[in-house]
């Protein structure tokens, strides 16, 4: 192995594990599955996913007007989203029934994540509009991210890399099995 730093940037060159390869993230970086316009006919994944079976769509639970699904590009293990079926961008445009069920599914998400994984805390929220950080601004979705003491270690902070210890399908199955019944 050479000590020349320029020689250590080629494909296949040993780099003492200074990088982790995450090729699955390239789809996200390139904008795969992002709607091209403002309507459900423009390829919105949140409009397409409910037509899939639960396993393929990573759907945890279905309600009358909203559904819960795992985030395909999670910030943390168990990162899920609550999403209305209706293609709507702004929280203020939700109908009363959608608002109520979105709140109920958020509460049930917290319960399921605590039961399935012992989550000690949560980040819950929405990014409304692309300037606010919404990756898919055309279709409202609320993030529920479980947190544990010490889960922000050197990997995401310094290495800018997330380490997920479980496959998404396995996480979906675990959370679906922990999903509480409607009260």
Image (cartoon, helix red, strand yellow):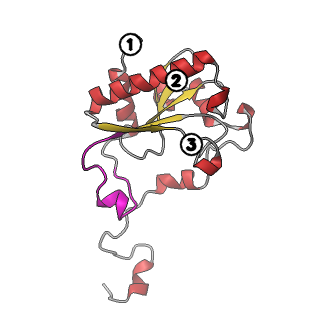
Q: Rounded to the nearest whole Å, what is the CA distance between mark 2 and mark 3? A: 15 Å
Magenta residues (range): 146-163
Q: Secondary structure at mark 1?
A: loop
Q: Which residue is mark 1?
A: 181
Q: Rounded to the nearest whole Å, what is the CA distance between mark 2 and mark 1? A: 15 Å
Q: Rounded to the nearest whole Å, what is the CA distance between mark 1 and mark 3? A: 28 Å
Q: Mark 3 and mark 2 in contact (Cβ < 8 Å)?
A: no
Q: Which of the image's four quarters has the C terminus? A: top left
The image quarter containing residue 177 is top left
Specify which label sits upstream in the sequence, 1 or 3: 3
Q: Which residue is mark 2?
A: 102
Q: Secondary structure at mark 3?
A: loop
Magenta stretch holds residue 41? no
* Other-residue count near label 2 (Cα within 10 Å), few / some / many at <14 / 14–19 / ≥20: many
Q: Mark 3 and mark 1 in contact (Cβ < 8 Å)?
A: no
Q: Secondary structure at mark 2?
A: helix
Q: Which of the image's four quarters has the N terminus? A: bottom left
* Other-residue count near label 1 (Cα within 10 Å), few / some / many at <14 / 14–19 / ≥20: few
User: In the image, residue 179 lies at what x, y percent?
Assistant: 37, 21
Q: Single out the residue that lies furthest toward the top.
A: 183
Q: Is residue 41 above or below residue 28?
A: above
User: In the image, residue 149 lies at what x, y percent?
Assistant: 25, 46
Q: Mark 1 and mark 2 in contact (Cβ < 8 Å)?
A: no
Specify which label sits upstream in the sequence, 2 or 1: 2
Q: Which residue is mark 3?
A: 127
Q: Residue at x 37, y 53 (%)?
A: 162
- For the residues carrying marks 1 and 3, which lies nearer the camera in this image? 3
State the predominant SS element of the stretch in magenta: loop
Residue nearest the observer in this picture, 175 or 183: 183
* Other-residue count near label 3 (Cα within 10 Å), few / some / many at <14 / 14–19 / ≥20: some
Residue nearest the observer in this picture, 166 or 143: 143
Q: Residue at x 34, y 24 (%)?
A: 111
């Amino acid at each position: 192995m050479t000590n020349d730093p320029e020689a250590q940037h080629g494909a296949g060159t040993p780099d003492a594990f200074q990088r982790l390869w995450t090729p699955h993230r390239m789809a996200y970086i390139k904008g795969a599955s992002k709607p091209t316009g403002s309507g459900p006919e423009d390829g919105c994944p949140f409009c397409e996913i409910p037509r899939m079976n639960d396993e393929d769509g990573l759907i945890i639970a279905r309600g009358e007007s909203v559904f819960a699904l795992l985030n395909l590009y999670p910030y943390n293990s168990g990162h899920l989203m609550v999403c209305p079926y209706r293609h709507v961008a702004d929280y203020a445009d939700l109908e009363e029934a959608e608002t109520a069920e979105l709140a109920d599914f958020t509460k049930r998400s917290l319960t399921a994540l605590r039961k399935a994984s012992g989550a000690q805390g949560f980040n819950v929220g929405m990014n409304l509009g692309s300037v606010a950080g919404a990756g898919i601004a055309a279709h409202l979705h609320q993030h529920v991210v479980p947190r544990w003491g010490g889960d922000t270690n050197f990997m995401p902070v310094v290495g800018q890399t997330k380490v997920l210890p479980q496959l998404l399908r396995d996480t979906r199955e675990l959370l679906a099995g922990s999903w509480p019944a409607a009260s």
